[in-house]
Amino acid sequence: MRETPTWRIPIGVLGLLFALCVYGLLIARYLPPVIGGWHVLLQAPIYLALGVIWILPLKRFLIWMETGRWG
């Protein structure tokens, strides 16, 4: 159990916010011209998958924030 604060948590939160903003901006900038003309039932699963895919590396990132190790 950690007794003292660590620099990894605030830096990790800021890094996560920055990465999510960049990811969201890239998706919002480059994806609509590609699939914007498609039927909504074809667009929905793509946006749903892209809305969930950012969670995949989150577990290792949170482990790093707490322990300093990636696994």
Image (tube, rainbow, N blue to C red):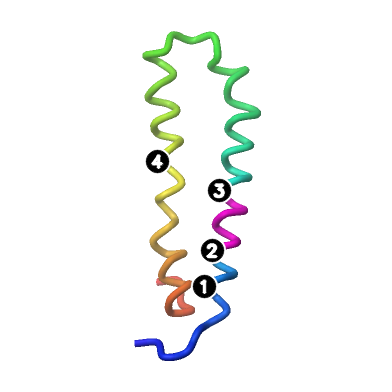
Quadrant in the picture for the N terminus: bottom left
* Disc 2 residue type (three-letter): Val
Kindly indicate whether the residue at mark 2 contacts the one at mark 1 (C-beta within 8 angstroms): yes
* Disc 3 residue type (three-letter): Leu
Residue bearing mark 4: 52
Q: Earlier in the sequence, mark 4 or mark 2?
A: 2
Q: Nearer the viewer, residue 28 or 57?
A: 28
Q: Which mark is residue 20?
A: 3
Of all residues, the one furthest to the bottom in this rendering is: 3
Identify the element where label 3 is drawn.
helix
Per the model, the C-alpha gap separating discs 1 and 2 is: 6 Å
In the rendering, at what x and y percent does residue 14 appear?
59, 62
Q: Earlier in the sequence, mark 3 or mark 2?
A: 2
Q: What secondary structure prevails in the magenta region?
A: helix
In the rendering, at what x and y percent does residue 67 appear?
43, 79
Q: Earlier in the sequence, mark 4 or mark 1?
A: 1
* Disc 1 residue type (three-letter): Ile
Identify the element where label 1 is drawn.
helix
Q: Earlier in the sequence, mark 4 or mark 3?
A: 3
10 Å neighbourhood of mark 4: few (<14), some, or many (≥20)?
few
The answer to whether 46 appears left or right of 28 in the picture is left
Was residue 12 drawn as part of the magenta stretch in this picture?
Answer: no
Total marks shown come to 4
Identify the element where label 4 is drawn.
helix
Q: Tell me which segment is drawn in magenta.
A: 14-20
Residue bearing mark 2: 13
10 Å neighbourhood of mark 2: few (<14), some, or many (≥20)?
some
Residue bearing mark 1: 9
